[in-house]
Image: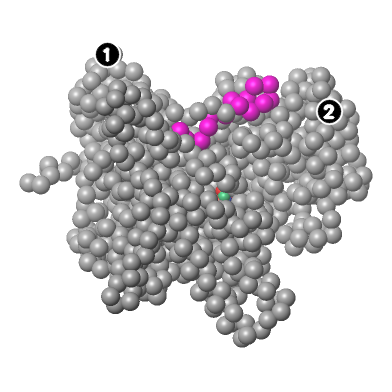
Amino acid sequence: MDHPAPIDVATSDTDTWRARIMAKLTYQVGKSPITASERDWFVATALAVRDTMVDRWFDTTRSTYQTGAKRVYYLSLEFLIGRLLFDCIGNLGLLDPVRAALAAEGVNLDRIKEQEPDAALGNGGLGRLAACFMESMATLGIPAHGYGIRYEQGLFRQVVRDGVQEELPEDWLRFGNPWEFERPEVAYPIGFGGTVSGQTHPDGRTAYVWTPAETLSAIAYDTPVIGGETATGAGQHANTLRLWSARAGEPMHLDDFNRGDHVGAMRDRVRTEAVSRVLYPGDESDSGQELRLRQEFFFASASLQDLLRRHVEQFGNVATLPDKAAIQLNDTHPAIGVAELMRLLLDVHGVEWNEAWRITVATFGYTNHTLLPEALETWAVPLMERLLPRHMQIIYLLNGRHLEGVRISLGGATGPAADQLLRAASVIDERHGRRVRMGHLAFMGSHSINGVSALHTALMQQTVFADLNAIYPGRINNKTNGITFRRWLHRANPGLTRLIVDTIGPRMLHDPEALQDLRAHAADPAFQAAFARERQGRKDALAALIAERVGIAVDPHAMFDVQIKRIHLYKRQLLNVLHAVALYNAIRAEPTQDWAPRVKIFAGKAAPGYKLAKQVIRLAHDVAQVVNGDPSVAGRLKIVFLPNYNVSLAEQIIPAADLSEQISTAGMEASGTGNMKLALNGAVTIGTLDGANVEIRDRVGAANIFIFGMTAEQVAARTRRGLEAYEDVAASRALSQALQGIRSGVFSPGEPDRYEGLIADMLERDTFLVAADFESYLAQQRIVASTWQDPAAWWYKSVMNTAGVGWFSSDRTIREYADEIWGAKSTLGTSA
Ligand code: NBG
């Protein structure tokens, strides 16, 4: 027998589960039920559940080998996973027996769940999307590996003291990680620096040999990713998330060690292993640090070596790589992989240049996640030459051939227009010191380049990639983002899910489009009441959490007006805070009016170096301090900032949100995914026509969403005209008053000019058009308030949102990637 008889994964027998968990507690955690802490129970439960996944995992791997199925490789510097316990138990369909087994020991599953630290290996949308995609690929039975870095420190923990964000390390591995398997034998050498030499063979071919100055090892850690419920069962397929950790190649300087200098002998180890120590905390922007480039090459190279080894072992020949492997680049972070695959094919596998390029382009796809100029990654040529000399050579050669093609397409035309096109199309940006444009490299090296919403894809074609799109037509396509409903509805909101199943049947659990059947119930008073009751339960729970975390008492029956996401000027939390100030002024001016009671809830982290974003956090706190303490608005307005936003906190806020704020400057939010999660749980959106909001409107109906503000086209026109905001401010009494209040120190009495910088930024160049959109936002917010006061109208819209967003399931998104980009097929139902 080559492995033990499989555990009966399908069992839902409580006693069996009780025995399994007890065995783990006793023999692996080494505790008795009397001394076991909640963490010990969590670990024992996780280990018992992991055993159940392992057999599925082996089955999947075996059948992928035996059927010769095509594999998907998802390369991402970020996986924002959160907790896995409910994901795994729920996807296996075992929540009830595991809950009952623990209860029999006097242990509460919902409490031990809190013991699991969030795996926060990402900053925001891009990283969370990668986690949803991994879960959907497993559910759909598409053979896939996620590849990333096993950061020892995830995204920083945010604490807010007197309104000021501070960053603390997030040591998520402190107590170990029960989900992963360390694979010390899976190790690849990763080189940096050194020299390249060419040797000309008798046949005239030149072979290049890169001799790195420094080599470290990438060690694999594997986590099984189990699929969820489908029409034919739960937990049927398991994929692998393989994360790399850096180890110093040579253990130590032996000469130093022999001389007795034991510390000196370890000196390089710390530096080398820093590569997988910490996640860069900037979202949408890159700090251009050498360590970041080292991280990118480290994980791209390890992943490519690993997948090439697997391919050659199974299929014998690299020429068939594009038939058997699809590699998706999640943003440009792994784009150096284009040059690394070329190097491996040319220098290691001896493939000739044109054939290597054919293989590369046919294998890679690239997803773009932002158009913000500061986020388009570039690396200084001297840095690249020093760190990756062979790759820089390859990039020059690629660029030379690419520009030659452009020249030919120009049909010999010369002059300023031709020069301009060549400069724009070049992989090397010559404008501010020579820099390698990673977006260009990813574009050239991929057969598919996709945006993440219809609007974003259209803008990609018109702006950043307009030239490359003309040179390589037909490569750009759209794949509107999605979210996994299993985490974001079924597990996060079980009460609402039960109500929906009781109303329209269980098909929606594996066929999200079936949610449309709810439309027939949207106007039914009895259903509305039941829907509202379920949501009220979650609002009561969130009110309790707010009291516990920040000590603010909120009315759980007030409208919960929620903006949760990274703090960024383009996302315009400032617009929302200014609305809070305007509302505060209005309530005080007319205290006897029938105001719709509101609680404004904010959560989100600012990049540590992003000063203006941190100012916005502080302003929200200052305004909250004054508003929450003013008895003249009591019962009508409260403002809450919940610190340390992460996946687990999102799971608690989203089911309790009434109003979803998606108010970015049109054209700037590539898609958004929080917008989808909130609408799915019945929040009504107030938003601009930006990112996926446009498609949400199309699906829930324009009458069931509150749209305001300039369109992307109007933003572009206005930006060309100039961005001064003095006139817009003068035209809005509410805005002028709000700004005047802030500037006169109403909210920062000890320091009236605390927000001068923030306000000057808006008045002098309102890049994000806060002032220009303010009146239109205010007008929609008034309509929101009056709708809230008409419960039948509100609940109708709310139900229509849940009913309308089935299309935003990441299962749908992944099917589109699989069919249209990867050519990968589900193996469900194919027995090995
Ligand atoms: C983000 C965009 C979001 C989008 C996610 C996922 C980055 C760099 N970009 O709008 O801002 O939803 O990517 O595609 O995180």
Residue 664 drawn at (x, y percent): 69, 49
Q: Residue at x 84, y 55 (%)?
A: 722
Give the number of the disc on residue 592: none
Residue lying at the far bottom in this picture: please name it: 411
Magenta-colored span:
153-166
Q: Position of residue 660 (x, y in %)?
A: 64, 43
- Which three-letter amino acid code belongs to the residue tagged 2? Asp
Q: Nearer the viewer, residue 487 or 782?
A: 487
Secondary element type, mark 1: loop
Residue type at mark 1 is Ile
Do labels 2 and 1 touch, CB within 8 Å? no
Magenta span has 732?
Answer: no
- Identify the residue under disc 1: 34
Name the residue that disc number 2 marks: 753
Q: Residue at x 67, y 56 (%)?
A: 432
Task: Name the residue located 37 percent from the left edge and 40 percent from the top edge.
Answer: 246
Q: Is residue 362 left or right of residue 98?
A: right
Is residue 795 visible to us here? no
Tell me if mark 1 has few (under 14), some (14-19) or many (20+) residues whose alpha carbon lies within 10 angstroms of its own.
few
Q: CA distance from mark 2 to mark 1?
A: 58 Å
Q: Quadrant of residue 7?
A: top left
Question: Residue 754 at what x, y percent from top left?
Answer: 79, 28
